[in-house]
Image: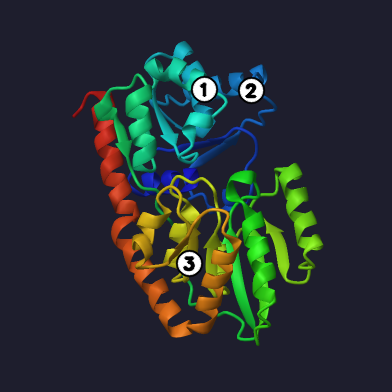
Amino acid sequence: MCVNISNILKINGYDVILCSTRDGGPLEKTISPGIKFYVLHKMHCFDFPAFTKLLRLVGENGIKVIHAHSSSVFWAIAVKYRLPEVKVIWHDHLGIKIEYRKKIFFYKLISKKIDAIIAVNNDLADWSRRNMKVPQGNVLMINNFPLLNVMERNPNPEYFTIVCLANLRPQKDHGTLIKAIALLVKKRLQKKIKVVLAGSVDHSEYTGKIKSLISELGLRDIIEIRGSVEDTASLLASANCGVLTSVSEGLPIALLEYGMARLPVIVTDVGECAKVVGHGDYGHIVQTGDSEGIANELLWVYNNKDEACRLGQSLRENVMGNYGPNQFINSYQSLLKRISGND
């Protein structure tokens, strides 16, 4: 989402500098020309040399607004202590279970220094209005949005291909999907089943557990852990169905990208997922942890190709109409004016 925002701001005439705390990764290649990109190579939360780089970056470039994603807001506020004229926007998209964050006390502690908060769903926005010492008018719910080069769908007719575009970490609960695939295999479909798990594998302990479960259920020839992908559009164009089995979400970009790619989708009822799929009008919704429910919905997509395609098209229309970049930039520009005193 950070790259998407940087790109759309650049398109709309803003000078943008994109800074990654740890590394660039595959999304670095999607950064628009003209956007300066820096990597701090942060090793830990008290990495003073990395913080010094950030402080110098902000000062030397005359940066007026820091748009900090998730926990990077702590470093943004540290910069503000040294450079009080800098405005800080916190972009909160870590999922609705904010009450369980280990650093919740510290979020509240620094909230007086936060100038504005963007939340990706109403639950997060309501939480910030109740708990964070930020003017309520500066706490906004602004939808995430996709920037995807849409391609014509071309799934392999010999396979029923399922994509799960989600970083391998506990919140995403890949185990439920894997168990659902084991149930689907027992149906002995005419087509071969292929599952692609695409996303970062940095969480080594969780990734190890997922690999063990795949082996335990005899699915190594069916499920591929691909890691981070550079060409999301091609991956989604090759799929028959997109799935998210998360136990917690804000507003997942993956779901919006599924929609842009016209994929039939199956999602758990977390965050804004149900709203994005029209509470069932544009996709299928199951409860968290329901492997059997996921398997049944996958079987429905397999057996109802035409109707599934219509759902995918409807989802795309909903995403384009309600979750596009224009909606984001209009709200964002109003917020910038407000915190700079130009409203």
| Number of dots carrying numbers | 3
Amino acid type at image mark 2? Cys
Amino acid type at image mark 3? Val
| Towards the viewer: 299 or 222 | 299
**Which quarter of the figure has residue 227?**
bottom right
Q: Are marks 3 and 1 in contact (CB under 8 Å)?
A: no
* Residue 229 in sight here: no
Question: Which numbered mark, 3 or 1, is in the foreground of this view?
Answer: 3
**Which quarter of the figure has residue 197?**
bottom right
Q: Are marks 2 and 1 in contact (CB under 8 Å)?
A: yes
Which residue corresponds to mark 2? 45
Numbered label attached to residue 265 = 3
Other-residue count near label 2 (Cα within 10 Å), few / some / many at <14 / 14–19 / ≥20: few
Other-residue count near label 3 (Cα within 10 Å), few / some / many at <14 / 14–19 / ≥20: many
Amino acid type at image mark 1? Phe
Q: From mark 2 to mark 3, how far is it between C-alphas?
A: 37 Å
Q: Residue at x 36, y 47 (%)?
A: 143
| Towards the viewer: 13 or 256 | 256
258 relative position to 321: left or right: right
Which residue corresponds to mark 1? 74
Q: Position of residue 210 (x, y in %)?
A: 73, 53
